[in-house]
Amino acid sequence: DELRYKNKEMEQIVYVASHDLRSPLLNIQGFSKELQESLNQIATILDEIDLPVEARAKFAEPLEEDIPDSLRFILASSSKMDALLSGLLRVSRLGRASINMKELDMNKLISDITETFSYQIKEAKARFPINELPSCRGDDVKINQVFSNLLDNALKYRDRKRDCIIMLSGKKEDGHIVYCLEDNGIGIAEKHMEKIFEIFHRLHPGDSDVAGDGLGLSIVRRIIDRHGGKIWVESEPGKGSKFFVTLPE
Ligand code: ADP
């Protein structure tokens, strides 16, 4: 009970912090844009004034470089902070959202997901053969989110040196269902296997051709936790990864 209470309290703090920190952030973004406009006005006024060349040169550095550069940094940092806060907010909302358990036809759910991802699958020239899957119990929207995230990652972190093959299988085991999404992508080193489920944790944050916010797997784990299930990964760098998910039967 104490743990549950502490968790609730923690969630409330995260919610309030991420929600309330956004208002001052909007002010920073709004006023930075106003400063940008005022700066443009000053530049126009200066253009219209007859100024000696030397005086004009003195204005050039602050007006054309220093101030615009600073404004760009302020705006870029505040957008980054905005993205982090909305991520936190999404995660904290998940902890409070209700879970509507029902019998899930996984074959239907996965075929819907495959349809949604048909563009990405085609673009990656990936093969994702559909196997017969056992059904389970869960919230259809949330479980769709789980497998969409896992499939999205399998496509994003593919090894571009070989054909991308993704397989999904499922079997009954000790009163629950275990699903396994296997890819032949870049793989994950053992030391990172737990860390990838942490919020905002990305293994290649500077890699510009793979976009992401480091939220996907922490959201997935949270959803699975709330279903009373488990998620873990087995992987070999350079060979591929297997993400296992257990859900109630
Ligand atoms: P994101 O994809 O937005 O970075 P995730 O939480 O979904 O965030 O994943 C966290 C990190 O785990 C990723 O940045 C990536 O480094 C690693 N990862 C996730 N899925 C895979 C996968 N199938 N193969 C290799 N690495 C993966």
Image (cartoon, rainbow, N blue to C red):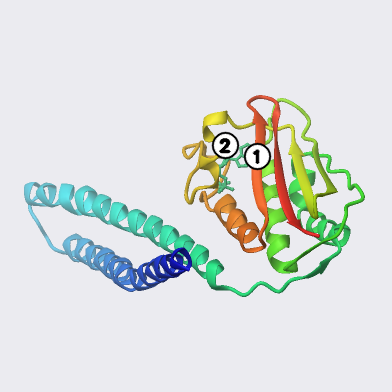
Specify the farthest residue to the front. 1
Question: Which badge, 2 or 1, comes first in the chain's sequence?
Answer: 2
Query: Height in image: 180 above or below 42?
Result: above
Mark 1 C-beta to ligand 1 under 8 Å: yes
- Residue 58 in the image: state x and y as whole percent: 10, 48
- Residue 146 in the image: state x and y as whole percent: 68, 56
Q: Is residue 171 left or right of residue 214?
A: right
Q: Which residue is mark 2?
A: 193
Are there few (<14), some (14-19), or many (20+) residues within 10 Å of tag 2?
A: some
Q: Nearer the viewer, residue 83 or 88?
A: 88
- Residue 120 in the image: state x and y as whole percent: 73, 48
Secondary structure under badge 1?
strand
Query: Height in image: 162 above or below 92?
Result: above
The amino acid beneath tag 1 is Val
Specify the farthest residue to the right. 132
Query: What's the residue at 48%, 60% (across, down)?
Result: 87
The amino acid beneath tag 2 is Met
Secondary structure under badge 2?
loop
Q: Are marks 2 and 1 in contact (CB under 8 Å)?
A: yes
Q: Where, by quadrant of the figure, is residue 15 drawn?
A: bottom left
Q: Which residue is mark 1?
A: 233
Q: Nearer the viewer, residue 81 or 144?
A: 144
Rendered-image quadrant of the C terminus: bottom right
Q: Is residue 191 left or right of residue 36?
A: right
